[in-house]
Each structure stands twice: as structure tokens, then as C-alpha cells.
Amino acid sequence: MRPFLPSLLIMSSSLVQADIQTREIPYQSADGTQLLAYYAYDDAAQTPRPGVLVVHEWWGLNDYTKRRARDLAALGYTALAIDMYGEGKNTRHPADAKAFMQAAAENAQSGKARFLAGLELLKQQPQTDASRLAAIGYCFGGKVVLDMARQGVPLAGVVSFHGNLSPAVPASPGSIKARILVEHGEADSMVGPEQVKAFKAEMDQAGADYRFVSLPGAKHAFSNPDADAYQAQGLDLAYQKQADERSWSDMQAFFEKLFGE
């Protein structure tokens, strides 16, 4: 679709940032959990824009997740980085991240309620075209958006970046309404070939409209420049600039087709 202000992409970063408005928005899920979202949009846009939810890695709602929301806003979307843990908490310690993630994953219905609360909040923003919605997720967030697609949440499309591919509840034939893009690191030791094979079989059986991209040499967390810093903590993570840029370009093309007129 053409009203995406492509001129922003060739302007200086300072001028682009001057147009991007951000704010934190407290909200809560149906189970009463207090949540905190980060909203970003381009105030130069004259009409409501497609909205994109951003779901964080297992680290929680941190600066990286918020930066991705701003990146989406610079492309002309409204973007809401949502909170799957509560109160916007985040960490840089793997043990804490694992505990946060496990607690969030224990109750699938609670997790879905938190996602849907974020989706409703995005729809309520005056800059958002509530009829055109998508979601992206990283690592833990990639699994979240795939699970929401499996459960038929009304989204036009979802994108998983280095996400876990194992389902909370496997998709059934016809259950997936959203188009799916998966950006996977070929050298990801945390999401191995058997999981990839099982995911593809599940999607084929469900009749999903999906594309699976395997990025050569890329490890888990390939899109996050902070990934290398976590290697000292025993995690097999690595940033790869080429995979980061390729996957983001794939996402842009996916959304342009998804929301094109």
C-alpha cells in the first residue's frame, strides 16, 4: 500500500525520530494481571494505519523490544510492544528469564488473555486501523504469535523471528486464519531440525498459508545486537547482521503484501 511514507526511509535518523511518538500505557488482562505496553506511531500519518503487536523475547519488555516498535512506526505502522509477564518486568539474567517464561507458559489461557488484552489496546488507539492487524515476536514471543495463529486469533498475519516452533496446542485443519512467516536461524541449537520438521508437518496438515525461511549460519537470537553479550552466560546465542537485515526485509515485504491495496 502506498501511503506508507516511504520518504521516511531515506531521511536522516534525527528527522525520522522527530516524527515518532511513543508512550507507555498501563492496562490489564482478563485475569486481572497488571500489564504495561509501549506504543509507537508516526504522527505525520494522516489516516489510521495497520497495527502490529510486538511480543518480547524471554528477557521481557526491554529496550530491544521497544526499539522494534519504533522501527515499525518508522515504516508507517502503529506498533504496540506488549507485556506477557506483568508490570513490564524484564531482566538480563537467564535464570530469571527462564522463570518468567515458565510462569507465563504454565497457563495457556492466561497467556492468551494477556495477548488479547494487548490486541484490544492496539485496536483502541486512534491511529490504528482495527481492521488490519498483525503480530511479530522474538524467541519466546515468536512462539506466542505462532500459538495465537494456531488458535485462530483474528490477525491478518504473524511473523516469528528465531521463535520456538513447538505448539502449546497443535493446529487443526482450518484453525489457522493468519498468514505466517517464520524467520529461523539454520544454526539455531535451541530449535533443531526435528522441531523444524514437526512444525512444517503441522502447518501442512492444518492447511496453513505459511513461509519458512532458513537463514544460513544464523544462531538463536540472530536479530538482537545484544545477543553476543549473553554468550558469557553459557547461552548459544549470536547476532548476525546479514540475517537480521534479511529477516526484517522479508517482514516488510510480507506486510506490504498483507496490507496492500
Image (cartoon, helix red, strand yellow):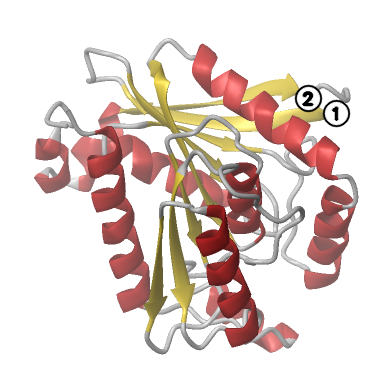
- Image location (x, y in percent) of residue 246: 29, 68
Q: Is residue 105 left or right of residue 64?
A: right
What residue type is disc 1 on?
A: Thr
Depth check: 146 or 208 in front? 208
- Please, is residue 22 above or below residue 165 in the view? above
What residue type is disc 2 on?
A: Ser
Mark 2 near mark 1, Cβ–Cβ under 8 Å? yes
| Labelled disc at residue 29 | 2
Q: Residue at the location (53% across, 23% down)?
A: 122
Q: Place residue 87 in its image quadrant.
A: top right
| Labelled disc at residue 2 | none
Q: Place residue 51 in its image quadrant.
A: top left
Q: Secondary structure at mark 2?
A: loop
- Image location (x, y in percent) of residue 90: 73, 51
Q: Is residue 81 left or right of residue 260?
A: right
Q: Is residue 221 left or right of residue 131?
A: right
Q: Residue at the location (57% across, 70% down)?
A: 201
Q: Residue at the location (84% across, 36% down)?
A: 110
Q: Quadrant of the N terminus?
A: top left
Q: Quadrant of the C terminus?
A: top left
- Image location (x, y in percent) of residue 221: 54, 72
Depth check: 202 or 236 in front? 202
The residue beneath circle 1 is: 33
Label 2: how many Cα within 10 Å (few below 14, some 14–19, many 20+):
some
Q: Is residue 131 left or right of residue 163?
A: left
Q: Residue at the location (56% across, 43% down)?
A: 174
Depth check: 112 or 65 in front? 112
Q: Secondary structure at mark 1?
A: loop
Q: Place residue 126 in its image quadrant.
A: top left
